Image (spheres, helix red, strand yellow):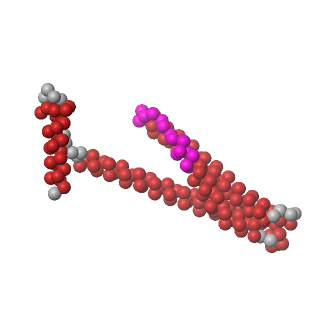
Amino acid sequence: MQTQDSQSVTNRVDGLLGYQANPADPSGVSVSQPSAALTAQADAAGAFDTLFLGLGAVALLVGAVGVANIMIISVLERRQEIGLRRALGATRGQIRLQFLSEAILLSLIGGAAGVVTGVVSTAVYAHAKGWTIVIPAEAWAGGLAAALAIGAIAGLLPAIRAARLSPTEALWSL
């Protein structure tokens, strides 16, 4: 039923548009509906956008787990250092800040490498297609901001665990 309605609208527009587009020969102008192929192409483009968004979310999750694991191992391997620093007067806040800063720095280095890789691959692809290379500032800034947030979130628990170590407990593991 909707096909008949859209067909009648198309016929009415076709009747009016011909006189507007080519007054000398209005029968030479025809109006048609988008083909099913164009509709399918638009649907496929939307599906690819969703697929790439999901792929990016999975990559961020994997990156967060990797940063968290590296920082937990770092805390375990550096217990003696933490104990010595605490015994020499470092506060829990200073220890927490050190490990959180390391997680954020580690994440930002990975994020910067990802942004550079994305920019280079986009530039190569655009150059191969003969397109103008356009990379919005929001794209690379968003990548770095996501890396910063992931580093802060993933490094928070290991930093808190490192700060909770007592000097005697940490030095005992020597």
Indicate whether 61 appears above or below 136.
below
Indicate whether 22 appears above or below 138.
above
Q: Is residue 77 visible?
A: no
Residue 152: percent from left, percent from top: 64, 58
Residue reaching furthest top? 24
Indicate whether 18 appears above or below 153.
above
User: Start and end of the magenta stretch?
Assistant: 128-143
Residue 41: percent from left, percent from top: 31, 48
Residue 62: percent from left, percent from top: 55, 60
Say which quadrant the C terminus sits in. Answer: bottom right
For image coordinates 46% across by 54% down, the residue present is 53
Residue 129: percent from left, percent from top: 41, 35
Indicate whether 39 appears above or below 65.
above
For image coordinates 74% across by 66% down, the residue present is 162
For residue 166, which quarter of the picture?
bottom right
For residue 19, which quarter of the picture?
top left
Residue 135 included in the magenta stretch of the image: yes
For image coordinates 21% across by 45% down, the residue present is 33
For residue 125, which quarter of the picture?
top left
Residue reaching furthest right? 88
Left or right of 95: which side holds 23? left
Say which quadrant the N terminus sits in. Answer: bottom left
Residue 112 included in the magenta stretch of the image: no
